[in-house]
Image: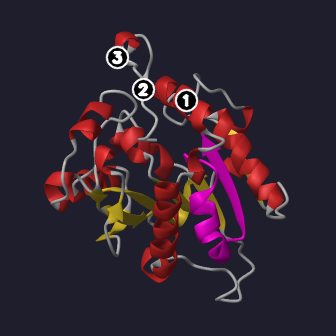
């Protein structure tokens, strides 16, 4: 997260971005979500996701009287922002995060909220570098065939967003929807580009946001259809030293159903 500044560049060549992020988020896991601007950001993302459920294309099992249960993956789950936002529209949720500290927070919070591990639980793993964070469960059916996969505020931490979207799409069921929430690049949103944010980008993040064409192309390359992109309803107010006002986007696409 932006507020916690680590000087990584002296050993950046030896450590992958994933390893730097793992260390960073293990350190901040317990308290990061109580910071006021992050609370506000989380609330805004929750509202925008819930208001756009129909547009996103959720096929809630209870709506159609179907016996099919809706299974969701919250990737780079943190303490479960996307899980809590979309819980009313799905039946079971699995989380994945590169940081074991975040996974601990996620599972603790799920338990506190009264969910059984069958209903909601997370594991520590990294789809881009599975050997770096090994998990025996990654190959199990439980972690494949998702009706919804959500990745909130994490794509800008990833070394290769095209590969990330490909890896996520492989875990979708046919007809499943991939939802991504992240920053619109300042050049497209017209939001200010803070020097501090630019400096920060040299450490745990790869970019300060995305153009629609960047994400659309990645969805297309991953074989996803029904592209949708929209900006969040209002800009997010972040501290001035890490960017000030910034604009979020929500992207969606689905895995085609093959006859």
- Give the mark, 2 or 3, whose residue is nearer the N terminus: 3
- Give the mark, 2 or 1, whose residue is nearer the N terminus: 2
Are dots 2 and 1 in contact, CB under 8 Å? no
Magenta-colored stretch includes residue 2: no
Q: Which residue lies at the image location 57% right of the left edge and 61% below the top edge? A: 82
From where the camera sits, is residue 28 visible? yes
- The spot of residue 70 in percent (x, y) is 66, 70
Q: Secondary structure at mark 2?
A: helix
Q: Is residue 25 left or right of residue 100?
A: left
- Give the mark, 1 or 3, whose residue is nearer the N terminus: 3
* In the rendered image, the vertical position of residue 139 relative to residue 72, given as above or below: above
Q: What residue did someone put label 3 on?
A: 9
Question: Spatial distance from mark 1 to mark 3, Cα to Cα?
Answer: 16 Å
Q: Secondary structure at mark 3?
A: helix
Query: Magenta stretch?
Result: 75-97
Q: What residue did someone put label 1 on?
A: 22
- The spot of residue 35 in percent (x, y) is 54, 51
Q: Which residue lies at the image location 66% right of the left edge and 27% below the top edge? A: 134
């Amino acid at each position: 997260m932006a507020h916690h500044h680590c000087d990584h560049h002296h050993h950046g060549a030896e450590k992958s971005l994933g390893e730097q992020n793992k260390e960073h988020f293990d350190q901040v896991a317990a308290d990061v979500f109580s910071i006021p601007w992050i609370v506000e950001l989380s609330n805004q993302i929750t509202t925008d996701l819930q208001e756009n459920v129909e547009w996103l294309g959720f096929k809630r099992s209870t709506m159609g009287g179907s016996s099919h249960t809706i299974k969701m993956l919250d990737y780079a789950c943190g303490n479960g922002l996307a899980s809590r936002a979309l819980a009313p529209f799905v039946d079971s949720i699995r989380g994945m995060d590169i940081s074991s500290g975040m996974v601990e927070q996620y599972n603790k919070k799920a338990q506190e909220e009264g969910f059984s591990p069958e209903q909601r639980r997370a594991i520590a793993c990294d789809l881009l570098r599975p050997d770096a964070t090994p998990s025996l469960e990654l190959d199990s059916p439980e972690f494949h065939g998702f009706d919804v996969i959500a990745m909130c505020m994490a794509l800008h931490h990833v070394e290769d967003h095209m590969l990330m979207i490909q890896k996520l799409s492989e875990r979708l069921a046919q007809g499943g929807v991939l939802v991504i929430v992240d920053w619109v690049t300042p050049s497209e949103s017209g939001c200010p580009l803070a020097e501090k944010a630019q400096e920060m980008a040299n450490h745990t993040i790869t970019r300060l946001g995305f153009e629609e064409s960047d994400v659309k192309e990645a969805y297309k390359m991953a074989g996803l259809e029904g592209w949708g992109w929209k900006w969040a309803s209002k800009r997010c107010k972040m501290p001035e030293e890490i960017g000030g006002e910034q604009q979020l986007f929500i992207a969606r696409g689905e895995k085609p159903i093959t006859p």
